[in-house]
């Protein structure tokens, strides 16, 4: 069994959505995919991601790691901007191992 369950979400914003403060276009590119450490690392390396807190420190016992796209994809014709996020779930040990591999500080 793979140690991680991963979902990739997206949100698309246009000018009207920005004014309203809410988007109607959000969802999953994929949901609850079982992945190995190698698969998760490959997915992370295929994009530019930022962690959801600063500094990059993972609390002790964390079972979720969220990464957000560092850059939005922009459609310059429509003005729509799409951002994505990875939601990586696993045991505290598996998440700690991934965070350490990514260079995050991990509380002991």
Image: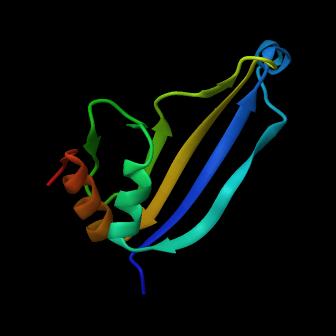
Asked if residue 25 is positioned above or below residue 77 in the image, the reply reads below
Image point (19%, 54%), residue name: 100
- The x and y percentages for residue 17 are 81, 21
**Quadrant of the rendered image containing residue 76:** top right
Looking at the picture, tell me which residue is in the foreground, 57 or 69: 69
- The reply to whether residue 3 is in sight is yes
> Which of the two residues, 75 or 13, is positioned nearer the viewer here?
75
Tell me the quarter of the image containing the C terminus: bottom left
In the picture, residue 31 is in which quadrant? bottom right
Q: What colour scheme has been applied to the protein in the rendered image? A: rainbow
* Residue projecting furthest to the front: 77
Total label count? Answer: 0
Residue extending farthest bottom:
1
Quarter holding the N terminus is bottom left
Looking at the image, which residue sits at the far left?
A: 108
Please give left or right for residue 17 compared with residue 31 in the image. Answer: right
The residue at 40%/62% (across/down) is 40
Q: Is residue 96 left or right of residue 77?
A: left
* Residue 28 image point, x, y percent: 70, 54
The residue located at (32%, 30%) in the rendering is: 54
Specify whether residue 63 is in view.
no
Residue 95, position in %: x, y?
Answer: 32, 62
On screen, residue 36 above or below 31: below
31 horizontally vs 49: left or right: right
Q: Residue at x 81, y 38 (%)?
A: 25
Residue 28 placement, left or right of 88: right
Query: In the figure, residue 96 lies in which quadrant?
Result: bottom left
């Amino acid at each position: 069994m793979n140690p991680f369950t991963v979902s990739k979400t997206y949100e698309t914003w246009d000018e009207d959505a920005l004014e309203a403060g809410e988007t109607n276009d959000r969802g999953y590119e994929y949901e609850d995919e079982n992945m190995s450490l190698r698969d998760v690392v490959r997915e992370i390396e295929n994009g530019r991601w930022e962690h959801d807190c600063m500094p990059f420190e993972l609390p002790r016992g964390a079972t979720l790691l969220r990464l957000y796209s560092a850059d939005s994809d922009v459609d310059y014709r429509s003005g729509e901007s799409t951002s994505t996020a990875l939601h990586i779930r696993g045991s505290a040990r598996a998440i700690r191992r991934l965070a350490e591999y990514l260079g995050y500080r991990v509380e002991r």
